[in-house]
Every structure is written in C-alpha cells, then in structure tokens.
Image (tube, rainbow, N blue to C red):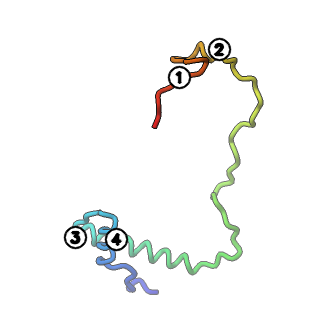
Amino acid sequence: MTRATKIITQDDVKYIASLSRVHLQKEETQHLTKDLEGILHYVHKLERLDVREIDPTSHVLPLKNVYRCDEVRSSLKQAEVMQLAIQQQNGFLKVPKVI
C-alpha cells in the first residue's frame, strides 16, 4: 500500500464525528483526516511485522506485586469501636442510608 492510497476520507471522519455527537469545523475535519490517515498507514506497517517469535506481553517492564503480605492481627473490640462511632444504635454503627 502506497502513501497515496486513501484509507479514510473526510466523509468517513464526518460520519464518525456524527456518531460521536462531535461537531467539527471544516479545518478540523481536514486536520483529523490527515492525522487518522497517518495513524492507519502506521498500523498497516505494523501488520506486516513478523511477530511469531515474540512472546506476548502485558507490560513492557517486568512488574511484580508490590502489596504487603496479609497478616492475621487481632481486631478492635466492639466497645472500642463504639467509642469511636459518631452514631450508634443497639450496639451497631449507624450510618446514613445510601441508595
């Protein structure tokens, strides 16, 4: 595919913009058509790459879990929690209704 081959037209951009409820000026349509055309040509180049020997990756950097290990610890007693409560009712925390 040569650079002169059109992948996307201004009519395509106008149609996509209408589906997205985006109102574009004529200059914006021309600019976006050119930008999207460049992006799609680049994607076409990437499609031609042989990646059979490359392992799939989810991250480019080797990441590992940075969370701390879970440790069993004793919790607060009910009486201690009730002392901290702003509102309580019948030994339970009273919170605003959330719908």
* Position in image of residue 41 (x %, y %): 45, 77
* Position in image of residue 63 (x %, y %): 68, 51
Q: Earlier in the sequence, mark 4 or mark 3?
A: 4
Residue behind mark 3: 26
Q: Is residue 97 above or below residue 25?
A: above
At a point 34% along the width and 71% down the height, the residue shown is 16
Mark 1 residue element? loop
At a point 27% along the width and 67% down the height, the residue shown is 28
Residue behind mark 1: 94
Callout in the foreground (4, 2) = 2
Residue behind mark 4: 16
Q: Amino acid at mark 2?
A: Glu
Callout in the foreground (1, 3) = 1
* Position in image of residue 40 (x %, y %): 44, 75
Mark 4 residue element? helix
Distance between the Cα atoms at labels 1 and 4?
A: 51 Å
Distance between the Cα atoms at labels 1 and 2?
A: 15 Å
Q: Earlier in the sequence, mark 4 or mark 2?
A: 4
